[in-house]
Image: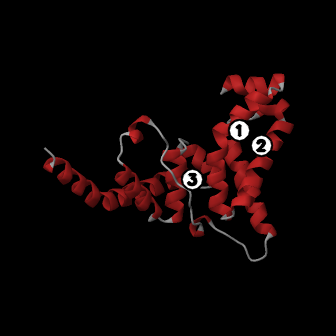
Amino acid sequence: MDDLLYRIQFLGDQQAFKAFYQQHVFRLYQFAFAFLRQRQAAEEIVNDVFVKIWQQRARLDKIANLRVYLYVAVKHAALNHLRARPFAEESLDSLHVQHFRLAPQAEHLLLTHELQKAIASAIAQLPPKCQMIFKLVKEDGLSYKEVAGILDISAKTVDAQLAIAIRKLSVLLTPFLQTSRRKQEVRP
């Protein structure tokens, strides 16, 4: 990513910016959508954040953690959008997070389609705050400290919410895993 940022900042390389955009747009869109529940508004907010990044590319090296900066910028833009709507106060606890998907990493490719559906269903049953934190840590690969900064909560809260999420997922997925093991034992 450092090479991309260098090319964006110092060379004004639009191809590098496009690659950078493609690396981050889907996750940021999911994050914005969790707040807004409106596809078009979420897309506009994410694209506006990227336009500002491009316009201020000469200062990219001044940003300590660009990935966290992007999430925080999207969060603030989404909250500003919500404040502009009458009677639209949202809290993190009332969010309904959608559009979760498992990242296509090597270990996930080994999962069966049924298990993927069971995991998605179990994640959907988590409380909204747990869903958001689980997604940011486990799917987007952010650290506890980064998530805490993005959501304006403590790292201990992130840890506690993630522990709750993992405990609930374990309970929800245990019956499915036991059934899957039995099916595999029966096969010749």
Can residue 51 be seen in the rendering of this structure?
yes
- Separation of disc 3 and disc 1 at Cα? 29 Å
Is residue 178 shown left or right of residue 106?
A: left
- Mark 1 and 2 residues: CB-CB less than 8 Å, in contact? yes
Front in this rendered view, residue 177 or 78: 177
- Mark 2 and 3 residues: CB-CB less than 8 Å, in contact? no
Question: Which residue is identified by label 3?
Answer: 154
Residue drawn at x 74%, y 77% is: 87
Question: Which residue is identified by label 2?
Answer: 50
The amino acid type of the residue labelled 3 equals Ser
- Separation of disc 2 and disc 3 at Cα? 27 Å
Is residue 133 shown left or right of residue 33?
A: left
Q: Residue 8 appears at what percent x and percent y?
A: 78, 28
Q: Residue 56 appears at what percent x and percent y?
A: 85, 37
- Quarter of the image where one finds residue 85: bottom right
Residue drawn at x 82%, y 43% is: 51
First reached walking from the N terminus: tag 1 or tag 2: 1
Question: Which residue is identified by label 1?
Answer: 21
Q: Is residue 149 above or below residue 179?
A: above
Residue drawn at x 37%, y 58% is: 118
* Label 3 Cα crowd, 10 Å radius (few <14 / some 14-19 / many 20+): some
Q: Tag 2's secondary structure?
A: helix
Q: Residue 179 appears at what percent x and percent y?
A: 22, 57
Q: Is residue 105 above or below residue 32?
A: above
First reached walking from the N terminus: tag 2 or tag 3: 2
The amino acid type of the residue labelled 1 equals Tyr
